[in-house]
Structure formats: C-alpha cells, structure tokens
Image: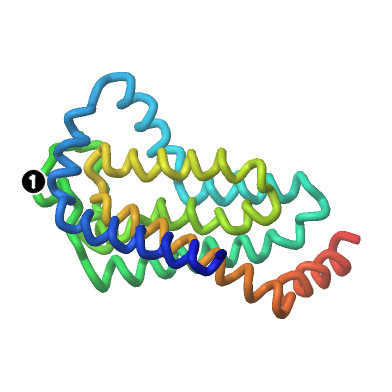
Amino acid sequence: MKNKRVIWIIGLITLLFILSLYFDAYIVKGVSYLKNSIFDEILLGLTFTSTEILIFFVLTSLFLWSGNKRKWILPLWFTLILSALFSFILKVTIQRPRPFQQGLIEIASFLIKDSYYIWDFSFPSAQAMLVFCAVPLLSKEFPKFRYVWIFLACLVGFSRIYFGFHFLSDVIAGAVIGYLLGAFVIRKENENRLWENIYWKIYNKFVK
C-alpha cells in the first residue's frame, strides 16, 4: 500500500512538472495579475527574510531548543549545504534565464541582483530546495511543526513566482530535489550514525 502511494505521488509530481514546463510562461503572467499592495508587502517580506542564513538559524535554533534532538543539527547543516551545492551546480549547468529576464514580467530594479546575470540562474529555485530539504527531518523529529513549515515553504515558492524570479517548474524541481536530498541524508544517518558520532565527540570534548 505504501509503495503504491509513493508511486502515485511520484507520478503526479512528474506529470505536474511536465505540464508546468509547457505552461510556465502562462502561469507567471497569470500570477502577475494577482498583484496588489497587500500581497506585495507580505510576499516581499517573505522573499527578503527567506534567505539561506535565516533558514539556517531558524532550524538550528529549533533543534538546539530541544536537547534530545541536538544530534540532528549536523545532518541538518549537511543537508542545507548539500542543497546549496546542488542548486549552484544545476544553475550554472542549465543556465535558464529568469522570467523577468525573458521579458515575461517586469520587476522593480532594487529586486534585481547582479548575480542573476552571472551564475544565479532560474532553474532550480534555491529557496525551494533549502526550505523543502528540511521537511523530511522536521517530519521525523517535529511532526506537528512540519505542516507549518510546509505551508511556509509553499508560500516561499509562490512568492518566487509572484515576483517573476522563477517559473513554476523551477519551484517544483527545487522542492522535489530538496526533499529527496533531505530524505537521503536521514536514511544514511540512520544506517551509519556518522554525524551523531561526530556530534557526541565534539560535545564531550568542548561542552561536557
């Protein structure tokens, strides 16, 4: 039953991704019609605060707050670094221009970074990768909090489309890749306890 469910989910996501590739331009333009001052303020704040550093500190603080879960801090850091690395490699390899660079939507000049024209391309969404890579670990250790995080992650993804930074396919790909990386790290950690052993060595030497 579980395997069938996984197959259905994978199939649905794959279909959604393929469809999004075809309708990407229409979706970006359609979302742009939703723009209003209220959405601008909320989503702009979310866009500016959902940086790698903020995600890093929020999640780290969450695990530090619960003492018995601190052993998962190193796997969390590794997952975030791995996601950032994969995102960078894919961006410079594929080099897909962002929606605003293709003239599909206009955005304020202060939102445009020089890196968008050098290495920080559209595919995949790095923000989506970073927020979704933490979902497997949060689901495991903080099951009640995962729904809040998933909702926040979806808002982050929507904000990237709303402002013309990404296509829907960029966000879907980033979310899926991030989630799979997070699940992979957890699986390997459960098998060999590498990061847990390193954590306790550091703890016993410098903290205890």
- The answer to which image quadrant residue 155 occupies is top left
For the point 27% across and 63% down, the residue is: 119
The location of residue 140, given as percent across then percent down, is: 67, 56
Q: Taking 189 as reference, is 106 left or right?
A: left
- Horizontal relation, residue 163 to residue 33: left or right: right
Residue lying at the far left in this picture: please name it: 103
> Is 154 positioned to the left or the right of 105 in the image?
right
**On screen, residue 37 above or below 21:** above
What quarter of the picture does the N terminus occupy? Answer: bottom right
**Displayed quadrant of residue 200:** bottom right
- How was this image coloured? rainbow
* Quarter containing the C terminus: bottom right
Percent of width and height locating residue 62: 68, 45
Question: Residue sitting at 35 percent across and 32 percent down?
Answer: 44
Residue 30 is situated, as x and y percent measured from the top left of the image, at 17, 36
* Outermost residue, right side: 208
When asked about the image quadrant of residue 202, the answer is bottom right
**Label 1 amino acid?**
Gly
| Residue at 82% over, 51% down | 67
- Pick the residue in front: 58 or 178: 178
Residue positioned most to the bottom: 192
Q: Which residue is mark 1?
A: 103
Q: Is residue 148 above or below residue 121?
A: above
Residue 153 position, x and y percent, is 46, 44
Question: What residue appears at the point 78 percent right and 74 percent down from the top-left corner?
Answer: 197
- Label 1: element kind: loop
Classify mark 1: residues with Cα within 10 Å, few (<14), some (14-19) or many (20+): few
Instruction: Spot the residue most to the top.
Output: 37
Q: Is residue 115 shown to the viewer in this render?
A: no
